[in-house]
Amino acid sequence: MQKLNFPNYTFRFKNSENKIAIFDEVRKKFILLTPEEWVRQHVVQYLLLEQKYPKSYINVEKVLKVNGLTKRYDAVVFNPDGSIFLLVECKAPEVKITQNVFDQIARYNMVLKANYMMVTNGLNHYFCQMDYEKERYQFLRNLPDFTINQ
């Protein structure tokens, strides 16, 4: 698999019927290794190890309904109250991050109402903070720290 613009992480792999699978720590199972899954697993490690987001608040590849259509988000990080702190959209490295990709995550976010969004193809990462009053997002250099308010 291609080298991505993330720190080096250690992954578990298995080979079954000449197909390689990678272990997903969050889903606790092996997933067929595709270029997009390679990016997704790097994002999961990035959220856990670099950002120190709690694993119990991270959810990977779940179904959501957008305008009556069934879609899947790549990853979310929940707040303790169940609202969504971060919505992540992953693309394969060869997929360019275009306005269409931002439109896709914005459509998902109309349903999910995350505070922050991350879009990545493993090579380029974009972080945004939502401003719901002005109906726009503002680009950030990095993701914010995750704090659990007591």
Image: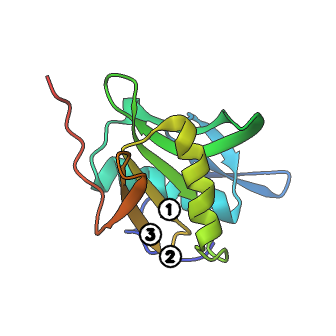
Label 2 belongs to which residue?
Answer: 123
Q: Which residue is mark 1?
A: 119
Q: Residue at x 57, y 53 (%)?
A: 105
Q: Are marks 1 and 3 in contact (CB under 8 Å)?
A: yes
- Residue nearer the viewer, 123 or 101: 101
Question: From mark 3 to mark 2, how far is it between C-alphas?
Answer: 7 Å
Image marks 3 and 2: residues in contact by CB distance under 8 Å = no
Where, quadrant-wise, is the C terminus in this rendering? top left
Crowd class of label 2 (few under 14; some 14 to 19; many from 20; radius 10 Å): some
Which circle, 1 or 2, is nearer the viewer? 1
Which residue extends farthest front? 134
Horizontal relation, residue 149 to residue 48: left or right: left
Q: CA distance from mark 1 to mark 2?
A: 11 Å
Identity, as a three-letter code, of the amino acid under mark 3: His
Q: CA distance from mark 1 to mark 3?
A: 6 Å
Measured from the top left, where is residue 118 in percent x and y? 44, 58
User: Which is nearer the N-term, disc 1 or disc 3?
Assistant: 1
Q: Amino acid at mark 1?
A: Val
Q: Residue furthest right?
A: 17
- Name the residue at 59% across, 45% down: 108
For numbered disc 2, what is the local secondary structure?
Answer: loop
Q: Would residue 75 be visible to someone looking at this image? A: yes
* Vertical comparison of 20 with 54: above or below: below
Label at residue 125: 3
Residue 5, by quadrant, is bottom left
Which percent across, then down, holds residue 9? 42, 61
* Discs 1, 2 touching: Cβ within 8 Å: no
Across and down, in percent, residue 104 comes to: 63, 56
Disc 3, SS: strand
Query: Circle 1 — which element?
Result: strand
